[in-house]
Image (spheres, rainbow, N blue to C red):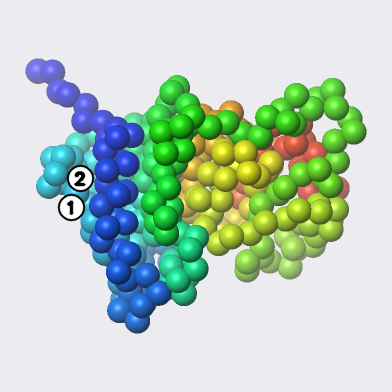
Amino acid sequence: MNVTFKTVSEDILIDVSKQVRDNILGLVGTEEGNLKFGRGAGGDISKKIDLVAEETVINTLKKKYNLRPTIIGEECGKIHGSDDGYLIMDAIDGTTNASRGLPFFCCSLAFALDFKLSSVVSSCIINLSNGDIYHASNGNGSYFNNNKIRVQQEYTNTDLNTSLNFGDLIIGTNVSGLSKPNLEKIETLLSITKHVRHFGANALELCYLAHGYLDAYVDIRNKIRITDMAAAYLIVKEAGGYMFSDTGLYLDSTLDLDERLSFIASSSKHIFNMIYDVLKKSD
């Protein structure tokens, strides 16, 4: 008997993300949206806005599209489905921003064929504050509101450009809650980089790398969960960028919620090597 593999396509993820935006906008920056409901599977306090967003994703997939993949969510944990594949979601990435009404938070959705990061085949990240959408599917490139995007091209051929320095680059990073040893490790990088950015929603910041706004994004806190990473991972790669672990290997992991990642994302291998060399010298 032939069984049809039910894929959660890029277009479906886009539609689901729009539904999330419709359902949560009225909760942004409100007392109701900030109501707390204990700790989610990811370890953070779940707020009403998080739970409404996750419920929207699950119900839209089930009721509108008759899709029941295994769900891996920051609040709900792992919900085993009857279909093949895995839907990885951070229904609200940047909840703290959303709770204060700061306009930088997103919904991050990805679909993977197998239980590993490198098997993600479709993804969507919507900026919930303004509706902008980043999306990608395996082998078909990355898009911003249906327009194809690439990482910053100015420094992509810099293997021969030895004059490139950190004063030329815009590097995103997150140092919130960074351990003292890792803070000392990244101190040199921060001090020699003239343009450092941190906005408060990891998934959307990685989209800024894919769009060419940033040249690299560094997070060595060993705190990033797979739900924070899965959708942006594909968007960066399909835009021509690179995702490395903090040990210098190409980034990959299981989709286990207990995984905690550090990474260096960059628009070129040369820029990665520049950053990695600085971090290694600080060990």
**Residue hosting label 1:** 59
Q: Which mark is residue 262?
A: none
Instruction: Identify whether 216 is placed above or below 160.
Output: below
Label 2 sits on what residue type?
Answer: Leu
Q: Residue at x 29, y 35 (%)?
A: 11
- Name the foreground residue: 49 vs 2: 49
State whether residue 214 appears in this view.
yes
Instruction: Identify whether 223 is placed above or below 270.
Output: below
Q: Residue at x 66, y 62 (%)?
A: 175
Residue 154 horizontal side relative to residue 209, left or right? right
**Residue hosting label 2:** 61
Mark 2 neighbour class, 10 Å CA radius: few under 14, some 14 to 19, many 20 or more: some
Label 1 sits on what residue type?
Answer: Asn
Tell me the distance, in whole angstroms, between the alpha carbons under discs 2 and 1.
5 Å
Q: Position of residue 201 (x, y in %)?
A: 52, 58
Q: Quadrant of residue 98?
A: bottom left
Q: Position of residue 218 (x, y in %)?
A: 66, 49
- Name the foreground residue: 86 vs 218: 218
SS category of the residue bearing label 2: helix
